[in-house]
Each structure stands twice: as structure tokens, then as C-alpha cells.
Image (tube, rainbow, N blue to C red):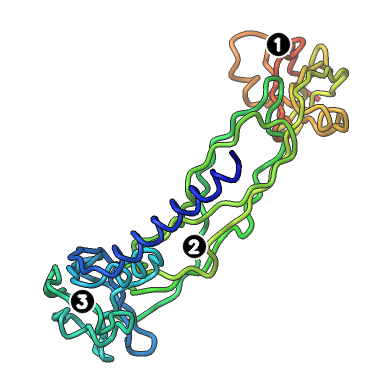
Amino acid sequence: MKNKIIPIILIVIFSLVLWGSVTLSEYYVETLKFPLEVVDQPKNYSSSYLSHKEVFIKFRARGSDLAKIILTGEHTFKISAHKRIGRFKVDLRNEIENNLWITSSLNIIEISPASVECEIDKTVKKVVPIKINVKINFAEGYDISSRILVEPAEIEISGPAIILQSISEIETDSITLDNVKEKTIAELSLKQINGIKFSTNKCRIEFDVQRIVERVFNDLFVEVINVPPKKQLNLYPDKISVILKGGINKLGRLPNDSIKVYVDYLMAVKSEENFIEPTVEIPNFTKLLDVKPQKLEFIIKEE
């Protein structure tokens, strides 16, 4: 049985090859789309305007020649600026010789559009920051515990001055990171802008993620600020406790003096009662959950 199957498979393969060779040798009419590219620009100049970004070319050619173009997918239709500056019109039929990939075996029936307008302006450079577009979904019980580092944080871009003047930042492609629960490093691609060159096309982000816990900090001394000469502001009590929420490693290493607690004498003077709420400044990437006591009794005295 096995010996009968092998000849059948060979016959099928031979038939497909024969059919393919016959098909590729026949002539077809096909319309293909190509991006436009301006070349031969003066030094330190670049294209700031192109009325069309793409061109449609209708070919009559053998299937094999059309297949080569379709399968590579790397061709652009080049327009020569001939070192000109300013705005000018280009007949695309006259640009065929600038595209060596269009061989004599490809018969061009139609080009659409037939012509385009192009403008060449002086090229300038500019350094702008990178804006990341990242959505982070943390695993349950985890959260970010550091700032997001971006490397590089800014890039140099170059292109026509008229385009660069409206660019204040370069955005990354949008990505989503799911179920994040550990230190993360990711590479992001930058959104390309027609006519603008980037010093790099990618950036890297890095941030730390930790399990979120709570910690109590006791006996934090309350500082009194803005006390004028010959005045005193006595607090009762003069120490408080706070509860912070944050990454387990970060909270575990925090000393008491990393939390600043104070009251402002000027706010006490304006108070209509003899109680004042302390201000608590906490480290980045921590959250204040509670303060005990929330209000402190005070007495203003003369020295």
C-alpha cells in the first residue's frame, strides 16, 4: 500500500510544479502600490511636502516578473529632486529611469497619480523627549515601586524646519503589559513621522514592581515651622504614628527620618480651635493610609 502512495504523491507534486510554471510564464495585468521616495536632494535639505505618499502602477508582465516584485515587497518609487530647492511638480513617467527595479520586462500601462508636487526645505536638527505609551496591568497584590526609567529619555531628530517646529516630543507605539509582578524591562518602538529621521528607532523602559504591604512607623517627631521670634508653639502630643502602604522591599528599608512630619505656626494662628492637623510628607511610591492622632492640641506662648 505504501509503495502505491509514493507514486501518487510524486504525480501531485509534479502536476503542481507544471501548473505553476505554466501560470508564471503567462502574461497578466496587475496594479501594484508603492511608497514614493524623494532622492537627489541638495546637501542639508529634505522634502517637507509631498502631495501624494503612494503611487499606483498598472503593469503588463509575465507572472514570474510580477511575482518577484510582489514577494519582495521592498520597492519604492524614487523621485529625483535634481538638487532643486522650493516647490515643484514632477511627472512620474519621467522618473521611471530612477527606478532600476522597473526592468524592460515590465510594461507600464498606467501610473496614478500622473504627477505629484514636492517641496524641498533646509534640514535642521532638534532634541526632543520620548513619551511612552504603556498600560501596565499589575498582578493582584503588586504595584510599581520605582519611577519608569526611559533610555534614551530624548532623541535627536532631523528634517525640514517647517515640520520640526511643530514637534515637541516623540511617542512610542502603544503596548500593554499584563500580570506584572517583578522588575520589568521592555523595548518600545518609536512612532515614525514621514520626512523625519530619528537618531534611534527604539527605546527601553525599566521599572521595579513589588508586593504591596503595610507598615506602621511610630514615634515620629512633629516639627514646628515658621515660628516668629519670641513665640512658641507647643504640641500635645509632639509625636505621631503613621501607616504607609508600599513595596515590601522599599518599606522594609525606610528609616523613620525618611518621613517628614510638621505643622505650620501660621496655620495654627488662623485656626478657630486649639487643634491642628500635621502635614505628612512620605517617600515616592508609598501611600499614606492613616495618621494617629489625626489632630494635635497646641498652645501658643510668648518667650
Locate residue 79: give its quadrant.
Answer: bottom left
- Tell me the quarter of the image containing the N terminus: top right
- Closer to us: 175 or 246: 175
The residue to which callout 3 is attached is: 118
Q: Are marks 2 and 3 in contact (CB under 8 Å)?
A: no
Above-or-below relation of 138 to 291: below
The mark nearer the N terminus, 2 or 1, is 2
The mark nearer the N terminus, 3 or 1, is 3
Asked if residue 211 lies left or right of residue 180, the reply is right
Q: Are marks 3 and 1 in contact (CB under 8 Å)?
A: no
* Mark whose residue sits in front, 3 or 1: 3
SS at mark 1 in the image: loop
SS at mark 2 in the image: strand
Q: Are marks 2 and 1 in contact (CB under 8 Å)?
A: no
Task: Give the x, y percent position of residue 294.
Answer: 71, 11
Residue drawn at x 73%, y 39% is 208
* Mark whose residue sits in front, 2 or 1: 2
Amino acid at pointer 2: Val
Task: Give the x, y percent position of residue 146.
Answer: 71, 39
Residue drawn at x 58%, y 19% is 270
What is the distance, in whole Å, between disc 2 and disc 3 at their CAs? Answer: 27 Å
Task: Give the x, y percent position of residue 6.
Answer: 55, 48
What is the distance, in whole Å, between disc 3 and disc 1 at their CAs? Answer: 70 Å
The residue to which callout 2 is attached is: 128
Amino acid at pointer 1: Lys
The residue to which callout 1 is attached is: 295
Residue drawn at x 49%, y 56% is 190
Q: Residues within 10 Å of mark 1 (few under 14, many from 20)?
A: some
- Closer to us: 199 or 56: 56
- Closer to us: 242 or 102: 102
